[in-house]
Image (cartoon, rainbow, N blue to C red):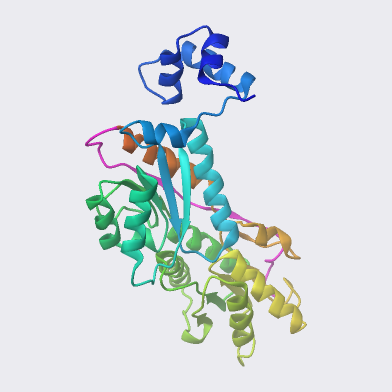
Amino acid sequence: MKATINDVAKHAGVSIKTVSRVMNNEPSVREATKEKVMASVVALDYQPNLAARNLAGTKSYSIAFIYDNPNAYYVIDMQNGILKACKSKGYELVIHPCNAQSKNILDEITLMVKMSRIAGIVLTPPFSENPEFVAHLAHLDVKVVRIMSGEIAPDELSPCVMVNDHKAAFDITEHLIGLGHKRVAFLAGGKAHNSSAERFNGYQEAMQANGLEVEESLVVDGEYSFESGVEGAKQLMSLTNKPTAIFSCNDEIAAGALFAARLMNIDIPQQLSIAGFENSPFSRQTWPKLTTANQPTAQIAENAANLLIAETKKQNQQVMVEQFTPELVVRDSTAQSA
C-alpha cells in the first residue's frame, strides 16, 4: 500500500500539519524539522497527490513548460532541469508543446492555463522573445520566467535567465582564427530565435576584431536542423574560394555539415575545421567529436524553474535576472589551418 501523510507524520514524530507545511515548502519550518520529515518521505517512498492538493486549495502547485523547438535534446534537457526543481519543491510540471506560428496560440495557452490551474510558466524562445505573448500571460494572472539569448533583459515584464550567446560565439570564432583560419564560414539557425542573431553578431565581431572580412558568400541562412547543416556545407564547399573552417549555430547543424563533408571526401579537421554550439549529444556522437560551447541547458532550466516557483510564492517580488555564458570546449573537429 502507498504511504499516506499520516504514515509520514507518525514515522517522523510530527503532526500532519507539519508534514503538510514541509511538503508545501513553507519558509517558517525549521531546517531540522524539514530534514526529519524529508527523511521519512524518502524512507516511506511517500508521493503526495499533487493534483488533489491543487483542487483542494486556492493555491496552484503546477507550473508549465511550453515550447516550440525541433531540437529533441534541448527539449529533454529543459524538461529534466525543470522537473528537478519541481520535485524538490513539491510542484507538478505540465509539458505543452505547441506551434508558435499558430493563429490560435493565445487561445490555446489561455485554455491550458485555466484547465490545468497553472501557477507559472517557463518560457523558451521564440515565446520568451515575444513581449506581447508575455504581457498576455500577465493578464491571466500567471507568473512567468523567460529564458532568453542576450546579456541584458530587454524589459521588466518578468524575471529572466539570460544566455550570453554573443560572448560564446565570439570565443568560438576567436578559437578558429587562432588556429590560422582566415576564411571562417557561418551556418545560421532559424531567424525566429534571437540566439541566431546573437551568435552571428559574436562571430562577426570576432572576425572584424581580427581584421577579417565577413564575406556574404560565407554566411548561409538555415534552420536548427541536421538537414540544414548538410545543405549549408554543400553550398559552402561548392564555392571556388572555399572556407577552411565552419562555425555552425548549433551542434545539430555542425553534425550535418560534418556528414556532408564526409560525403565530399573532405578530411575533418585536416582540410576543414567544424565547430558547433550547445555541447549537446550531437557534439559527442560525431567522429571526430565537435568543438563547441558548453551550454548547460538542464541547469539553466532548473534555475529558471526555481526562480518561477519563488515568484509564485511572493507578491511584488523584484524582477530578477540570472546570467549564463556558455564556455568553449575544444575537441578534435578543429585544427591548425593547412
Q: Which residues are magenta?
A: 314-338
Task: Verify whether residue 329 appears in magenta.
Answer: yes
Residue drawn at (51%, 87%), measured in percent from left and top? 217
Residue 142 percent coordinates (x, y): 30, 46
* Residue pictured at 64% horizontal, 79% vertical: 230
Above/below status of 320 relative to 197:
above
Q: Nearer the viewer, residue 92 or 178?
A: 92
Residue ID at (62%, 74%): 245
Residue 138's x, y, as percent?
A: 25, 50
Q: Nearer the viewer, residue 141 or 108?
A: 108
Can you say whether 312 is above or below 183 in the image? above
Query: Is-magenta flag for residue 157?
Result: no
**In the image, 320: left or right of 245?**
left
Residue 85 visible to an observer of this rendering? yes
The residue under the point 71% across, 75% down is 259
**In x, y percent, where is residue 151?**
36, 54
Residue 261 lies left or right of residue 80; in this view the side is: right
Q: Position of residue 232 (x, y in %)?
A: 58, 81
157 to the left or right of 334:
left
Q: Quadrant of residue 176?
A: bottom right
Q: Quadrant of the C terminus?
A: bottom right
Q: Main secondary structure of the magenta part?
A: loop
Using the image, determine if residue 44 lies above or below residue 254: above
Q: In the picture, residue 256 is in which quadrant?
A: bottom right
Q: In what quadrant of the picture does the N terminus appear? A: top right
Q: Is residue 297 visible?
A: no
